[in-house]
Amino acid sequence: MPEAIQKKTEEAMAKAVAALEREFKRLRTGRATPGLVDNVRVNYYGSETPLAQVASIAAPEPRLLIIKPFDAAVLVEIEKALVKSDLGINPQNDGKVIRLNIPALNEETRKKLVQDTRKILEHAKVAVRSARRDGIKEVEDLCKQKKISEDIRDRYKDILQELTKKYESKLDGQQKSKEEELLKV
């Protein structure tokens, strides 16, 4: 039974790491990556659809994204969605594809983005700690119900703490590499 709690807790922590990765992909680093437009949704015949489902997205150059719709009729809707998004980049529509020129980041913007990575990191750490807290609570409940001994409870509390350290370390490593990427000129 405590093994199931451990597994569930570790899965929750892994989800926090994956969420951090997704958030970091969305941060603009001055380099074109398809992940920049992952959260853009397009009005596709009346339903909000992720951009990647209605167009191919390519980064042929370090500062250029090219978005080519599968259906030419949706080109204008893609352009509208990009303008509405919080990217801060004006799309260039040539009638067949949309080009997004990614501007170079200035020093002030880089520093602000580094601060943003720290905030995102802290949210992810809170999620990891919440998973640990929930796991410990479940183990405590099992002990109170006399389903496990106090020794087993204490051992699983230690295991959950080690998992927390492991996942927080992963989160710190991801934030550090993203920070280096942002500050690299």
Image (spheres, rainbow, N blue to C red):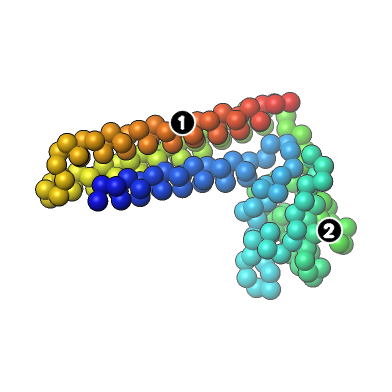
Residue neighbourhood size for the residue with mark 2, other residues' Cα within 10 Å, grouped as few (<14), some (14–19), many (≥20) = many
**How many labels sit on residues?**
2
Residue matched to label 2: 97
Indicate the amino acid at tag 1.
Answer: Ser
Q: Residue 89: x and y, percent?
A: 74, 46
Q: Residue at x 80, y 59 (%)?
A: 68
- C-alpha span from label 2 to label 1: 42 Å
Classify the position of the C terminus by image quarter.
top right
Q: Residue 50: x and y, percent?
A: 64, 61
In the picture, measured across the screen, residue 130 lies left or right of residue 48, that is left
Mark 1 or mark 2, which is nearer the start of the sequence? Answer: 2
Q: Residue 143: x and y, percent?
A: 15, 45
Residue neighbourhood size for the residue with mark 1, other residues' Cα within 10 Å, grouped as few (<14), some (14–19), many (≥20) = few
Visible in this render: residue 32? Answer: yes
User: Of all residues shown, which one is farthest toward the bottom?
Assistant: 45
| 40 vs 17, nearest the viewer | 17
Q: Quadrant of residue 165?
A: top left
Q: Residue at x 87, y 62 (%)?
A: 95
Q: Of circles 2 and 1, which is in front? A: 1
Q: Residue at x 72, y 29 (%)?
A: 106
